[in-house]
Image (spheres, helix red, strand yellow):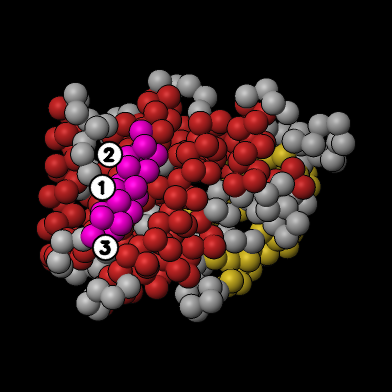
Amino acid sequence: MSDVLSAHEPELIKLRCAVRDFLRSDRAEFGWAPAVDSWLGGWDEGFSARLGDAGFVGLTVPKRYGGHGLGHLHRYVVTEELIRVGAPVAAHWTADRQVAPSLLNYGTEEQRERLLPRIAGGRFYSSIGMSEYGAGSDLAAVATKATRTDGGWLVSGTKVWTSGAHHAHQVVVLARTSPPDAQRRHAGFSQFLVPCDADGVRIEPIPLMSGAHHFNEVNLDQVFVPDADVLGEVGNGWHQVTAELSFERSGPERILSTGPLLFAAIRALGAGPAPDDRTAADVGDLVARLISLRQLSVSVARTLAAGGDAANQAALVKDLGTRFEAESVELIAELLDGTPSNPQLDAMLTTAWLHKPMFTLRGGTNEVLRGVVARGMGLR
């Protein structure tokens, strides 16, 4: 891909080259294969640790907490390179992408000192407990409840579609801490840092059709959470979650989950006879859409780097990007029809077909995201 992001930023070009060198040597030594949706299914704790040791995790975490004190554009460059080649990044992914910024924005000093160095080292794994049965797209309907008790809170409820919880050290739980208010549906929520091995936590798999296990049902039965593990201000959970979602929705992974498949397909088509005009036009359309979406995604990274609010732009990137990913799977399958079999390419295409229904669901359904964009434009 052309390096539009860092064309005038030598520091970012140098960083991009360093990441590429690391990925080439690490893959040669450890033999991991490029994968579609590697940030979901590529759980490799050894890779995450090596990536952390190389200085490519925790880029935006201040140096005093074990990070590198860099900006969102630096993290964008590293993320793009990792996802572009389908590297196995799932183990540290959520902690680095979402939990670290939340700790920096809302966490206590003790929480930062305890967790951020492990996150920056690629050795802390977190999951996010937001969705519930009946409260997937409408998080205001969350029914998980936290009740005040001596020294902390008792948390009870069920979370679903919790990625990586069966491997994670903790789940960040969104729970209701005050009674529902029909006039203020988003008030009264708080976030809690819940260890996955805490008493009262039970994690059950939600397997995919392929049998792969990425998602989980997390049941919490009177789980005691001390006050020290409340994330942010009690009652401010909705604001914290929506800020967190800007990081989840806008990154390169929302347009490049199928990138390894797309790039491999283009290489396979280029290795054969010269493509006909229709094939060339279809490939050109895919690449042009990808470039356009990348520019939108980069603009969100620049807004975040400047300390701005990017919730609406992030929702737009996620909507357009995940639709592109889903549509690209169908087109790539058509383009590859009749080409010589390639086991690695075939495996990625199979995974992409199985994951395709999830692209427009995770991180908020596209219908909900359009509502977010409409509100941001003053249309509703």
Helix, strand or loop under label 3: helix
Q: Quadrant of residue 25?
A: bottom left
Question: In the image, residue 319 lies at what x, y percent?
Answer: 53, 44
Q: Which mark is residue 77?
A: 2
Disc 2 and disc 1 in contact, CB within 8 angstroms: yes
Seen at 26% across and 47% down, the residue is: 81
User: Percent x, y for residue 212?
Assistant: 47, 74
Specify which label sits upstream in the sequence, 2 or 3.
2
How many other residues sit within 10 Å of disc 3, few (<14), some (14-19) or many (≥20)? many
Left or right of 203 in this view: 359:
left
* Residue 83 part of the magenta-drawn span: no
Which quadrant is the N terminus positioned in?
top left
Nearer the camera: disc 3 or disc 1: 3
Along the line of sight, the residue nearer the viewer: 345 or 42 = 345
Could you tell me which residue is drawn at 59 percent across and 61 percent down? 161
Residue that numbered label 1 is attached to: 81
Looking at the picture, tell me which residue is in the foreground, 312 or 51.
Answer: 312
Residue occupied by mark 3: 265
21 relative to 369 in the view: left or right: left
Question: Which residues make up the magenta segment?
Answer: 276-295
Count all numbered tags in the image, as a single digit: 3
Comparing 285 with 3, the one in front is 285
